[in-house]
Image: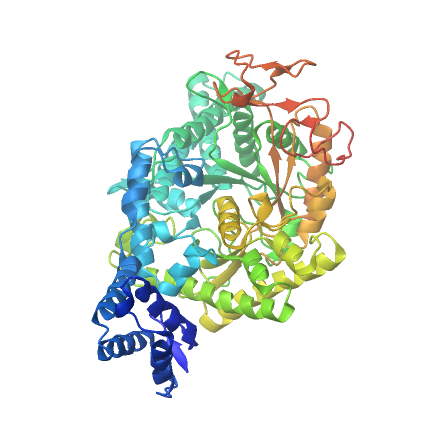
Amino acid sequence: MKVIKRDGKIVDFDREKIRIAIGKANICVEEEDRVNDTQIENIIKYIEKLNKKRILVEDIQDIIEEKLMSLRKFKLAKEYITYRYTRALVRKSNTTDESILSLIKNANKELAEENSNKSTTLASTQRDYIAGEVSRDLTRRILLPEKISKAHDEGILHFHDADYFIQPIFNCCLINIGDMLDNGTVMNGKMIESPKSFQVACTVTTQIIAAVASNQYGGQSVDLSHLGKYVRLTKEKFYNQIEDDVKKKLSKKELDEMVMDRLKNEVKAGVQTIQYQINTLMTTNGQSPFVTLFMHLKDDDEYIEENAMIFEEVIRQRLQGIKNEKGVYVTPAFPKLVYVLDENNCLKGGKYDYLTRLAIKCSAKRMYPDYISAKEMRKNYEGNVFSPMGCRSFLSPWKDENGNYKFEGRFNQGVVSINLPQVAIVAERDEEKFWSLLDERLELCKEALLCRHEALLGTTSDISPIHWQYGAIARLKKGEKIDKYLNSCYSTISLGYIGIYETTMLMRGVPHTEPEGEKFALKLMHHLRDKVDTWKKETGLGFALYGTPAESLCYRFARIDKEKFGTIKDVTDKGYYTNSYHVDVREKIDAFTKFKFESQFQPISSGGCISYVEVPNMEHNLEAMEEVVKFIYDNIQYAEFNTKSDYCHVCGYTGEIMINDDLEWECPNCHNKDKNKMNVARRTCGYLGENFWNVGKTKEIKARVTHL
């Protein structure tokens, strides 16, 4: 006999669940009002003798109530009915009161740690989080099928879009900034025409970024190469102005020099506008816009020289940093920077190698930019090189009606992530059970993703004119539905995954960096990819495998599993799961080997991937970093440095903090001496505290240093 549960899931009839439920009611009444084991057994047998192929769980409960009444156990029946009603209330109860009140009192630690870019003490951020809490509550209780809500709560999967699911907004996108600048746009009901200068183009770009960020959830990306055209326009304007002023009294060389001086100042001012506006604008979700600036010097770009000027200024200003309230230069969180390595700048004698060296210097001090290898990316995306959405989510190649590849103006609908280590924990090294359970849970993820997709269907362009009517994504008419951009591979919908390393340890007893573990990990990755490819064929939707949905999720899944299954060596004992396919941070592995090993997973995880190495202060080891960047170009599609330099939490100072042989240090800016309020790198041997990559002054990345 099969039982149909409230969420529609069909399970085998389990007689013990009836015995347990009646037993709980029995405890709540006096001895004379209870039923004995024989009477309970008779109730169970009655239900079994109905010989139904399928039965609703509500029908089973109705029968139990009737039988208790027929036995004249009225108090017990009342207790059972009360228990049943209470369970129904729990399933539908409001759960936001405590979380919202704790948020307002700044006592909600989970929300405070969820996003390091948002301060939960700010009224605007609190307002956004309150809306998110309400959305999560309604989503869990009403909008999602109960089995998906339950799976989310139990850490089987993570439904990333719950805190904005009640609204028809999507996750992240590539803004079609070229179209918006060239053909104009509309903001707040006001026409914005195509700019006539670089400075105005920069201002319009940041206003577009702020408007877009306020009407979607995740990150956005802007290809800066579209601004080169406006540098050219400004240059031509300067030529005309100066020629009119001097009436041809200057030589051609003198005229060129004067124009270039003005142009450099214009570019500097324009880039400063972008940097300061992005960092001072506050979107409606209580933070600076989550925006990535994409920098790719394409040889066939007629504005390549102008774009080289823009990129150089962007990197220089990021290297300098931005002043905080104390007047100290610090590293801003936004914009994120992505720099493309191509033949003309990959440190092999290319014309723009100087830009790459500047980018490396910036990475050493400010952690950005990230690096994309054009050579490797072309292998994975049908010869194309394009920006990630935000900083890590990638689109699939897609052609328009004219057969042209299109990436800008596309978006991601949403993300659901699967907890892979939990599958392995439950499977207990039973290979057959593992793959069977994995497939069962993947189908649950698919259903959750379809809920995300179906919630967006029927949305009209009026929900966000900047996206749908005025060019960021499309130029639809008022009232026109967005469905054609959902019901195709124009947009992606992503399956995320956590913990390849831990899953391999559980199933094979070795990390995935060892041959046996590597074989299993690749098999698992291909299995995930085959699933999303199958879903894509079945539905025509842009399902994609996404390797880096959220670092905070690594901690959430591990915390849930530790509470449920206890401490498991090399798995739950760490307090976190390793993100996607990454090598665990505790493994002793050099940067080159790490990148080379992880590079084989990136083409499989084409919906999103990045690899990184963590290093101590690198400002004195630029030659070593150059070798790593060369290696990135030849071996891996997308990589970054997580550079750790000294940082004072009191005043925000970033730079070298004085250390003597007695391990005493002092911030040179505010003279703080409290070691608990500083992150300090030990110059002679690596990082004092956590584990980071030790990079020598030679061109070889040396072995891992675990502790001073």
**Is residue 578 visible to the viewer in this orientation of the structure?**
no
**Is residue 77 visible to the viewer in this orientation of the structure?**
yes
> Which one is nearer the viewer's eye here, 35 or 261?
35
> Which one is nearer the viewer's eye here, 55 or 653?
55
Q: Quadrant of residue 193?
A: top left
Q: Is residue 336 above or below residue 161?
A: above
Residue 664, percent from left and from top: 62, 14
Q: Is residue 147 above or below residue 412?
A: below
Can you say which quadrant of the picture contains the C terminus?
Answer: top right
Residue 290, percent from left and from top: 43, 39
> Which one is nearer the viewer's eye here, 676 or 406?
676
Q: Which residue is found at the position 39% from the left and 65% from the top?
A: 147
Q: Is residue 651 above or below residue 8?
A: above
| Left or right: 58, with 362 as reference point | left
**Most distant residue in the front direction:** 32
> Which one is nearer the viewer's eye here, 644 or 14?
14
Residue 680, percent from left and from top: 60, 23
| Left or right: 289, with 599 as reference point | left
Q: Which residue is found at the position 38% from the left and 45% from the top?
A: 180
Can you say which quadrant of the picture contains the N terminus?
Answer: bottom left
Q: How many marks?
A: 0
Residue 359, percent from left and from top: 61, 32
Task: Look at the image and name its color scheme.
Answer: rainbow
